[in-house]
Amino acid sequence: MAAVACWLLAGTTSFAAPGGNSADGRPTIKFVRNPDTAPDFNLQSLDGQPLTLAAANGKVVLLNFWATWCGPCRMEIPDLIELQKLYKDRLQIISLLVDVDDVDDAKSFVHAAGINYQVGVATTEVRMQYGGISALPTIFVLDAHGRVVQKHVGWSDPRLYEIEIRALLGMPIPFQVETFEDTGEIFLKHADRASELPGVVFAGLTPEQKLAALRALNGEGCTCGCKLTLAQCRIYDSACAISKDRAGKIVAGLSAAPAPQVPAIPPTDSETRAAPPRPVPAAPSDGAGTSPETSPPHP
C-alpha cells in the first residue's frame, strides 16, 4: 500500500505503521495503543455551517487535510465519496483545506467534484494542533470516542481506510488488529518515547549513553525555525540539515566521552581471611634468654 504525497516541506518523511503482516504471516492493521483524544476545533464549512469534531461524537471520523492543487489529494476524493455513502450513518469524513488562496475557487472545486462530506478551511492553529501537517493528504483516523488511532501521510489504498473503519465499528474484517505505541508518528509530543530517530545513528553508544543522547535530543530545541525539539524535528522533517548536524554532534560527544569508572569488586571474606597466628611458646621462667625459635621442647 504505497503512499504518494504532496510535500509541504521538501524531504519530510513519516513512518506511521498502517499495516503489514503478523508474526504468523496474516495481514494486519495497526492502531495506537492508549490513543490521545483528537483536539477539537470550531470552524465553518464552505457552505457556512458549524464544523466541529464534537458534532461527530459516536461516529468514526476520517479527518483529512488536503489541497485542491494536490494530485494525490484529488485521486482519493472518489473513494472518500464512496466510503461516506457506504457508512453514512456511522462514519463522518471531515475534509480541511490547507493553503487556500481563493475560497470561492475551493467552493467551485468541491461542488464540481460532488463531494458529499464536510469541507472547511484549516486554520494555522488547527494545523499546529495536529503536528503542523508536513505533507498532503494527511488523514487522521478517529474512533467513535474521538481518539486518534492512526495517521496516514500521502495517498493510500482506499481499501485500507475501509478495513480500518469496519474494525472500529466492530464489523468483520479479514485482518488481524495489532497495536503500537505512538513514539511521535501520530503526535510529535510523544517523540520523547522514541528509541530511534530518523537519520540519527546510535551505534557504538552504550545503553546509558544512548539514553543520555535521547534526553538531550528531546531537551534541546532545533534552531531551524520549526519551534520543535531536535527529536521532534528529526521526525517532522528528516531532511532538516540543522537538526541532523546537531544530533550527530550530540551523539559524537557522548561516544567520545570516557567510559564511567567501574569500582573494583571488593574481595570476598574468604579471600581476605588471614591464617590464624601460630601459638608462641612461653618464655623460660629462669631468664635464660633463649628465643622461642631455639627453645628446647618440653620434656
Image (tube, rainbow, N blue to C red):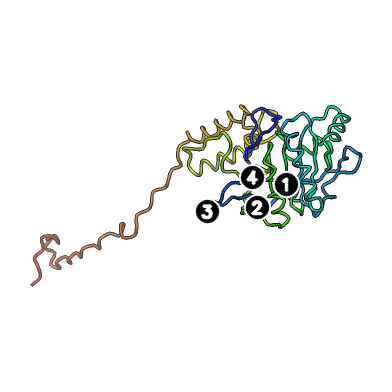
Residue pointed to by mark 2:
33
In the displayed structure, 44 sits above or below 109; it is: below
Label pair 2/4, CB-CB below 8 angstroms: no
If you read the primary sequence from the N terminus, does the residue marked by circle 4 or circle 1 appear first? 4
Residue pointed to by mark 4:
18
In the displayed structure, 272 sits above or below 67; it is: below
- Residue 45 location in percent, x, y? 87, 40
> Is residue 261 among the parts visible in the rendering?
yes
Q: Measuring 48% from the left and 39% from the top, which residue is drawn there?
A: 205
> Is residue 187 among the parts visible in the rendering?
no
Q: Measuring 56% from the left and 39% from the top, which residue is drawn there?
A: 213
Q: The residue under label 1 is which amino acid type?
A: Val
- Residue 263 location in percent, x, y? 42, 47
Label pair 2/1, CB-CB below 8 angstroms: no
| Mark whose residue sits in front, 3 or 2 | 3
Q: Is 196 in front, or is 107?
A: 107
Q: If the image is split into quadrants, where does the C terminus sit? A: bottom left
Residue pointed to by mark 1:
141
If you read the primary sequence from the N terminus, does the residue marked by circle 2 or circle 1 appear first? 2
Label pair 3/2, CB-CB below 8 angstroms: no
Question: In 3D space, how far apart are the residues under numbered discs 4 and 1 (Cα atoms)?
Answer: 11 Å
